[in-house]
Amino acid sequence: MGYDIERFVGYVNEGLLCCVCRDVLEDPLQAPCEHAFCSSCIHGWLVHHHNCPEDRQPLEGALLRPLFRYMRNDLSRLQIRCRNREQGCGMVCSLESVDRHERECEYGLVACTNAGDEYSCYRCGCPIQVERRSLEAHVAACEFRSRECPHGCGYTMLTCEDSQHSCVAELRTELELLRSEMICKVEEVRHEMESRLDSQRRHMVQKESLLKSEVEELKGQLSRVMSDVRALLGAERLHRQELEQAELEKRELLELLKSLQREGRSHTPSPAPPPGSAPEGLRKTGGARGLTLDCIKRKSREVTVI
Ligand SMILES: [Zn+2]
Ligand SMILES: [Zn+2]
Ligand SMILES: [Zn+2]
Ligand SMILES: [Zn+2]
Ligand SMILES: [Zn+2]
């Protein structure tokens, strides 16, 4: 929608009027046929039509272009009155700067700062709209302004709640709230601890059975080792006995050898016969000696093997 032509001071060229709403162009666009329209007006028109509203020539949105520069300049230089003229604003300024003025116009209506958000009900926020110039005065007296309780309970309340406010009741409610919150938290912590303990217990039980089976295995190993040791000790004892036996035999043989030597010496007195012509008796004795030595050697070898 364009600007109401009544708001303009002085002559407005007809070329600056919208072909749809017949007001002064707002946010203008132009068709290839050079007819101009407010952006919202022509887009609304093209939803149901496919032509220029002025001369019915074919038209679609993609063909719309910005207005000629000289026309835009003419448009922005037009002098317009503030829209809050009826509230008392006497401002007249160029079309170019009227938006900026109206955003700050002292006569413009604004919502009270205690209005709350868009979705809050009247009970939650102040429904009043005031002129910007009297906002401050309204806010100072607004019954939706909040302030801290003067009795020091710490509660922030709206002015309209003043009469119903009781510090004790307020504190009691808050205490109840805190208490229930605390109970919730304690319960939560207890649950967590219990589940943690449970999992630890399960873990310990597993570990215990593992350790038990390890102990059993070690016991088995130990008994095997013990029986091995016993067997080895038995073998050693046997060896020792055999060794003693061998030693005994050796000693006997040595005795035998000595007695044989003694016997030999008494039969063959010195001097010794020349080599190669030994008497038969000696040779016989020598043979016997050789036999005894062989026997000893064999015995001692057996001992070493043992
Ligand atoms: Zn229009
Ligand atoms: Zn046209
Ligand atoms: Zn104004
Ligand atoms: Zn208010
Ligand atoms: Zn209080």
Image: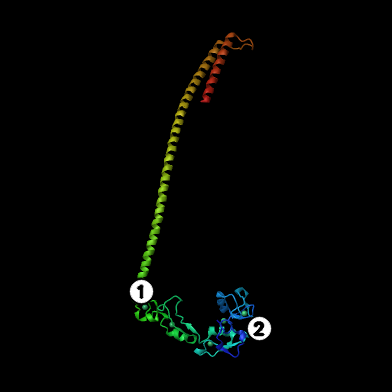
**Foreground pick, 227 / 2:** 2
Question: Ligand 1 appears in which quadrant?
Answer: bottom right
Image point 47% across, 24% down: which residue? Answer: 242
- In this rendering, position of residue 20 left or right of residue 218: right
Considering only vertical position in the picture, is 200 above or below 170? above
Q: List the residue tagged with mark 2.
A: 70
- Total number of numbered discs in the rendering: 2
Considering only vertical position in the picture, is 4 above or below 168? below
Q: Which mark is residue 250?
A: none
Considering only vertical position in the picture, is 204 above or below 296? below
Q: Quadrant of residue 287?
A: top right
- In this rendering, position of residue 93 left or right of residue 237: right
Quarter occupied by the N terminus: bottom right
Scheme of colours in the image: rainbow
Q: List the residue tagged with mark 1.
A: 171
**Foreground pick, 234 / 13:** 13
Q: CA distance from mark 2 to mark 1?
A: 70 Å
Dot 1 amino acid type: Leu
**Foreground pick, 231 / 121:** 121
Q: x, y percentage for residue 216?
A: 41, 40
**Foreground pick, 127 / 23:** 23
Q: x, y percentage for residue 243?
A: 48, 25
